[in-house]
Amino acid sequence: MARPAGIGSLLDIAIDERVGAPLFHQLYAQLRQAILSGRLRRGEKLPASRTLAQELGISRNTVLGAFEQLLSEGYLVMRGGSGTYVAGDLPDLRPEQARAESAVAPPPELARRSAILLAGQRTRVPPARSTLAPCFAPGFIDSSDFPYPLWSRLLAKSWRQPSRAIVDGGDPGGYPPLRQAIADYLRQARGIDCAPDDVLIVSGIRQAVDLTCRLLLDSGDKVWVERPGFPGIGAAIAASGGSLVHVSVDEEGLDVAEGLRRAPKARLACVAPSHQYPLGVVMSLQRRLSLLAWARAAKAWVLEDDYDSEFRYAGRPLAALRSLDGDGRVIYVGTLSKLLFPSLRIGYLVAPRALAAAFRSARAVVDDQPAMATQPALAEFFTSGHLAAHVRRMRQTYARRQQLLLQAAERHFGGKIVLSPDAAGLHLVGRLADPALRRQGDAKVAEKIAAAGVTVSPLSAYDVGEAGKRDGLMFGYAAVPDGKFQPGARAIAAALGL
Ligand SMILES: Cc1ncc(COP(=O)(O)O)c(C=O)c1O
């Protein structure tokens, strides 16, 4: 059932460049909403990407980026050469979810800035281990190997006869023994010298970013963010009033000189110096020192996002940027989303000493304290050696899977998509070495791969502005079962005619 051109206005799709969220994300969120609310019906055909791009006044690659995401999450399907359709059997559409989601369709009385929240983070559906199709979507870990029996024992033990401190709580920074355990862990693993009182337990890195922005930025203050980068960080900053200045990342990490040229008076810089996302670059010492020198001179702050530094397979990691900071300008944040499992929703922020009390007050205002349910068990997980054992085990699994991915790519891609080993991380970037693939652009290549039932992400989906201009595909490998690398690479090669 073809729908005439003009679907954008029929569905009230509004793309706003002034909103911090990437354009493809805004389109993705609005199409998804239209599907969930039934305005786009199951089996309905979508207009061609070129037509939709023209109608909305955006680039075709932006449309392809949104389609690719919806394809990978199962909302859309490709049918042979005949086009893109709303899936007939939507995987995670339950009636109550559809109702709840349609309730957040933007009514006119919402604030203008609510567009950032509505277009922001997507719900990520983890790849089902049982599906036949390999899913190389980045950002997922293998949570099947977590020691759940041990975890349930620790939870039960801490709640059998809980102390007053556990039941009544009252510390906005979080459960003191957990803050102590994290401070000890960061000293040993990351060279960070901090006191338990500098540590704030948060629900994850994005909450840490949100609190940091509320505390340190006035509305409209400029913030350097990495380009390409993790969209969730940009969305959290924009949602709390920060104005994003996208600064390029090269082989040495964030280009500090570019940041200085474009926004010397920025108030904050967000970086992932240990292992940049998505490029995987480790920030050079020279750049680290320049960044800190800028922060000192400009009285600006640096937020260090250390989201996956535990997953390092070769060599010793550079110590955290925070360990070089003699001026108290670095706010260090980490998460247990990748280390343990994502739904735990526990992360930590290490405040500079002079800001620790302010962070605790801010935390108490927005939400008295972090939920206590898991903190005592986590403290014991850290201090009894279970964390170290789990990280060791997962490191072996992920290192092996990176090798399996490299071998599969080497065997099936004929040098046309080139993956290089990375000493750390949970995904690899495959460079489009073949000029014909480069001409198509990474979004189109990812779309063709999705049509064969395999998911990869185009690197340009993590960039702003010139979507489709990047020449890379992201291959997440952590959640891919060992046996799926070869079939996955073979299917990709067949889809692209490699
Ligand atoms: C670079 C980067 N920073 C931060 C996060 C978010 O972490 P959290 O789930 O703790 O908010 C992610 C998650 O994928 C990430 O890739």
Image (tube, grey):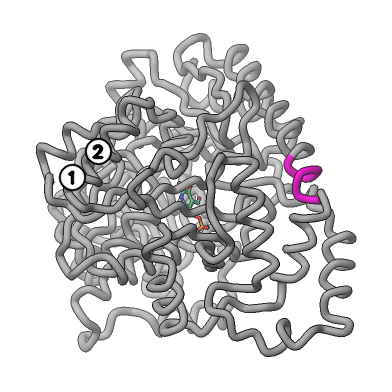
Q: Is residue 266 above or below residue 453?
A: below
Residue 438's label in the rendered image is none
Q: Residue at x 48, y 18 (%)?
A: 497
Could you tell me if the residues under marks 2 and 1 are in contact, i.e. CB atoms within 8 Å?
yes
Q: Nearer the viewer, residue 41 or 176?
A: 176
Look at the picture and state if 163 lies above or below 278. below
Other-residue count near label 2 (Cα within 10 Å), few / some / many at <14 / 14–19 / ≥20: some
At label 1, which amino acid type do we have?
Ala
| Front-lying residue, 493 or 212 | 212
| Image quadrant in which you'd find residue 134 | top right
Q: Percent position (x, y) of residue 58?
A: 17, 49
Residue 81 shown in magenta = no
Provide the residue designation for mark 1.
Answer: 297
The residue nearer to you, when weighing 117 against 159, is 159
Amino acid type of disc 2?
Ala
Residue 107 percent across, percent down from the top left: 26, 85
Callout 1: SS: helix
List the residue tagged with mark 2: 293
